[in-house]
Image (cartoon, rainbow, N blue to C red):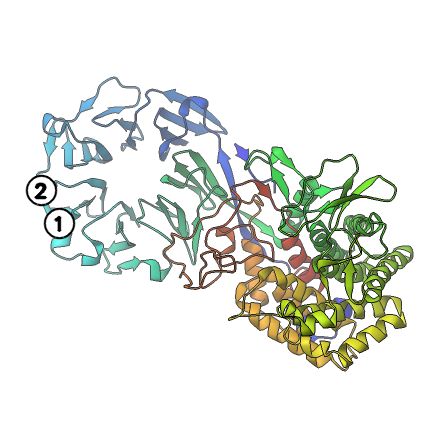
Amino acid sequence: MNTWVSFLLLAVFSSSPLVRVLGQTGERKFLQDIKTEITLPPQAGNNVLKLFSALQSVVAVTSNGVFRFRNGSWTENPNGSDWQTATVDKQGKVWLATVNSIQQENSEHKLILPETSKNDTILSLFWEDAKTLHVGTTRGLLIWDGKWNPQPEIKARVNAVVSDAQKQLWVATSDGLWRRSSGKWVNMDETMMDRGNGRNYFTLSQQKEGAEILLSTPYSVGCISETGNNWVLRASDGLPYGPVKVIRTADGGLWFGTDKGAIKKDSDWHYYNGKRWLPDNQVNDILPIDSYTVWIATRQGISQIKQVEMTLEQKADSLGKVAELRHNRRGLINYSWLKVPGDLSSSRMENEDNDGLWTACYLAAQCFRYGATQSSEAKELAVRTFEALERLETVTGISGYPARSYALATDSVKQSRSPHPKFWHPSPDGKWLWLDDTSSDEIAGHIFTLGLFHDLVADEGQKERAKSLVERIMTHIVDNDFHMIDFDGKPTRWGIWNPDSLNHSKNWMFERGLNSLQILSNLKTAIHLTGNPKFEKAYRDLIEKHGYAQNAVQAKVMSPFENSYSDDILNFFPYYNLLRYGKNDPNLPLYVQSLERSWKAVRSDRMPVWNVMASAMLEKDCDMQVVREELEQYPLDLINWSMENSHRWDLQRDMLAGRFDENQAVNPVPTAESNVWRWNNNPRQLDSGSGGAREEDGSYFLFAYWMARYHWLLAGN
């Protein structure tokens, strides 16, 4: 088997009763879905037709033969190349079918379809008893009991045959659901079945020892119960897609297979689609292995999906190891590229335009982790990442100007793909290269996390370094009339907080509230850390002369204006320092009003990091249950697979397209069924991902989890 995956202000708000109460329940365990690719013997090929449990083995029937898995290894019986389907008889023996013949494994004797059915194709097999085999074809049903007995009543495509507790036969066809009782065939669609079924049935199964017959129609799955407790599940009930062509009963629920993924129904719905979960979306069969494990057969192999009990802290530890193993480029943390899509052994790091921001996010996660646990590893990683932020500023040779990214002079660097030109420059000592056109993204990340590092992690020497870095950055901005000035002496494209631009230029209408909030928070942080009166004066001037505190109330731009998810991080980060360093600020009510407004705008997004920040700063429960749900659902597989959901029945499509004209749902796509999102993406986007071309670094999860832990908003402290 080849495994694809290896395995959050207590100090500020500790007086809050809510914050204390939320953290007193103990770290609970949950069941994490983990996918493992089952490696078949080379002779088996990839097209797995059927899975059975027989004679203490798992039997996989492929186009090439029968293969048994027992005690961790395969035994092989490659005996063909054109098998179409298979079944097991009452003694556990495997029977195989080609287009027009049937034979027992290891037997040379073949049952050839009769002359009247010579142009038919075998679709399904069912042993009623030790001597009676039912064969469904493209044009009817035949029974073999030593001789062929065509069933003249049934002339349609026969997809499945099962028997119930009363020994009645049920047959799923393309022209009705048939039942044989007391030797007589009845087409139930001519007597009792709902017309909405369209007389078309794709598969059958039975549960409760045959007391319930499970069936699939073009748009539903249903149950006929001998007690009369029938039921139907359709799109409005949460069925993601169909028609369902495989139905299997497992402990605690049902599994369904479709041509576009597998579905599990327990107390909720779970959809497994795309290469995060399956080697191919066409599901041929499903076999429950035990209460927590299933194997799913597809055209391209077998996936095992296993539920493993773990805590969120264990999950954070696993994702943290991924970040350190493959996502550290000279101290900068970001996603990695996979030269071979989906192959983690081909992972490589490249420079990215926002290395500074995403590295700051990782620093924040480690600061909160250290604040919550006093882990020596967390402190070591926080110090190392702080030093990377320091280097972003020192390599430019421009005091207070941090680069977007850096690399050693001997490293190969890629040019920015941004429509706004960005260029590489040598450091003053010639040892480094740095990327220009620094934006408000980097400044928001730096100032937010430098405050955290100073307060939660740094020793006295490191505190002075953090203070000095904040002072240099803010001096650069204030002395340059609230601009970030690049190497050429001109403002960068996005590093602008100047009143003339924000208050009087139509080009900056969108950023007026957002950038006003940012600069006030940046100045408040600098005031708190350095005590420099220059920053206090600038802060007061922007509020009293230019109305920045009032501007900040509308920091979040929301519908019907364009909704920029990428700006949410630039919106929420500033609140944290502005509120915790400004508890006695006369403008605090405006800042709280702004946060309440922003939280209301993003509440339905189910982005856990914003729930955590809002809960901590507003000192109330801002849907922390959603945080737990989302963190539990977040996949351990961080490969950015392509995830398609536009075909789904259960996701209501929004008639309004997203910011980039993408199709989107009314509600967020469930986390485990969507792209591995950061906080700057549209959680409602239906189709997303990069085809397995990169792996995310996990900082999104780590930030949200450790911030919640630090603030006692989750169990486990």
Q: Would you identify the image quadrant in which residue 473 lies?
A: bottom right
Q: Is residue 534 left or right of residue 271?
A: right
Q: Which residue is mark 2?
A: 153
Badge 1 density bin: few <14, some 14–19, many ≥20, Cα 10 Å: many
**Image coordinates for residue 312, horizontal then vertical, percent:** 62, 54
The local secondary structure at tag 1 comes to strand
Q: Is residue 418 visible?
A: yes
Task: Locate residue 461: give its quadrant.
Answer: bottom right
Tag 2: amino acid: Glu
Q: Amino acid at mark 1?
A: Asn
Residue 172, above or below 531: above
Q: Residue furthest top?
A: 108
Quadrant into which the C terminus falls: bottom right
- Crowding at dot 2, Cα within 10 Å, few <14 / some 14-19 / many 20+, comes out as few
Q: Which residue is mark 1?
A: 187
Q: Nearer the viewer, residue 454 or 505?
A: 505
